[in-house]
């Protein structure tokens, strides 16, 4: 029996954009050897390219479910200052926003994906598309607890510049992930990736409820990662 991981209506907020500027060389923190051992495969019995695809796809699913990135990435997150308050939404690792606004600009916002290691810069774009770096001392940055949603808040006595472009107005650059090596990632997450990749190996070609896809996970796999899921509700 598979578990549906999406329990709430999903809507996409067009006011948030993010781009991964630096990625690890390998997406999955689990090796092909680990998958071969768990699937009872002899070394070289199956194509290494195919097994790596299984691991990468399983990693993508688990990252999507948990709203986390496992190996260290650098991310640029953009926020639009146009229009009224942001809508709330829940969509995988995409950002859920509940913002306080002052004259059309947010005074606090959330970062995604988790866990955030450090915010390296915050900048704003004017109407001529010129980027200006803001002083990080003007912000309260909460990235201490890896199990809580990372947040950024403009200090009470600070203000954003008066003029800014309406879309992609504010850019926050930050590093996220557990580290640069697989050993830094929680064992339960690595085991969940192995289990999902093994299940998909033995059920390749299945259709419908017999295969584990983006919206469904085996109950055991879901139970292992449930402590790491960052719900944005």
Image: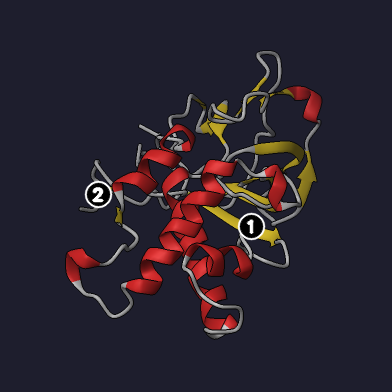
- Of the two numbered discs 2 and 1 on the same chain, state the one appearing first in sequence: 2
Asked if residue 144 lies left or right of residue 101, the reply is right
- Numbered disc 1: secondary structure: loop
Q: Position of residue 70 (x, y in %)?
A: 62, 49
Q: Residue furthest top?
A: 156
Asked whether the viewer can see residue 80, the reply is no
| In this view, 219 is above or below 198 | above
Question: What is the crowding at mark 2: few (fewer than 14 residues within 10 Å), some, or many (at least 20)?
Answer: some
Image quadrant for the C terminus? top left
- Residue at position x 32%, y 63% from top? 213
**Looking at the image, which is closer to me, 81 or 48?**
48
> Where is 221 relative to 48, above or below?
above
Q: Measuring 58% from the left and 38% from the top, which residue is drawn there?
A: 111
Where is 231 relative to 170, above or below? above
Q: Position of residue 226 (x, y in %)?
A: 41, 36
Out of 146 and 201, give the one closest to the viewer. 201
State the residue position of label 2: 4
Q: Residue at x 66, y 38 (%)?
A: 116
Image side of residue 23 versus residue 197, left or right: right
Tell me the element at label 2. Answer: strand
- At a point 74% along the width and 37% down the height, the residue shown is 119
Q: Is residue 95 left or right of residue 4?
A: right
Q: Nearer the viewer, residue 28 or 83?
A: 28
Q: Are marks 2 and 1 in contact (CB under 8 Å)?
A: no
Which residue lies under the disc numbered 1?
29
Mark 2 to mark 1 CA distance (whole Å): 24 Å
Residue 35 percent location from the top left of the image: 54, 66
Above or below — where is 24 with respect to 178? below
Q: Nearer the viewer, mark 2 or mark 1?
A: 1
């Amino acid at each position: 029996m598979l578990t549906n991981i999406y329990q709430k209506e999903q809507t996409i907020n067009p006011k948030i954009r993010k781009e991964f500027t630096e990625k690890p060389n390998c997406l999955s923190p689990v090796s092909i050897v680990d998958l071969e051992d768990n699937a009872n495969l002899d070394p070289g019995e199956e194509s290494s390219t195919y097994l790596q695809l299984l691991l990468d796809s399983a990693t993508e699913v688990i990252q999507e479910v948990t709203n986390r990135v496992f190996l260290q990435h650098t991310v640029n997150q953009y926020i639009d200052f146009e229009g009224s308050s942001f809508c709330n939404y829940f969509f995988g690792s995409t950002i859920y926003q509940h913002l306080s606004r002052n004259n059309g600009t947010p005074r606090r916002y959330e970062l995604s994906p988790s866990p955030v290691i450090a915010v390296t810069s915050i900048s704003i774009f004017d109407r001529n598309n010129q980027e200006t770096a803001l002083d990080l001392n003007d912000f309260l940055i909460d990235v201490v607890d890896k199990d809580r949603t990372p947040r950024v808040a403009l200090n009470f006595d600070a203000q954003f510049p008066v003029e800014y472009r309406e879309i992609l107005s504010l850019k926050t650059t930050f590093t996220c992930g557990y580290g640069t090596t697989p050993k830094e990632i929680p064992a339960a997450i690595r085991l969940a990736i192995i289990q999902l990749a093994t299940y998909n190996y033995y059920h390749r070609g299945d259709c419908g409820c017999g295969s584990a896809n983006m919206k469904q996970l085996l109950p055991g796999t879901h139970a292992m990662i449930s402590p790491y899921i960052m719900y944005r509700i």
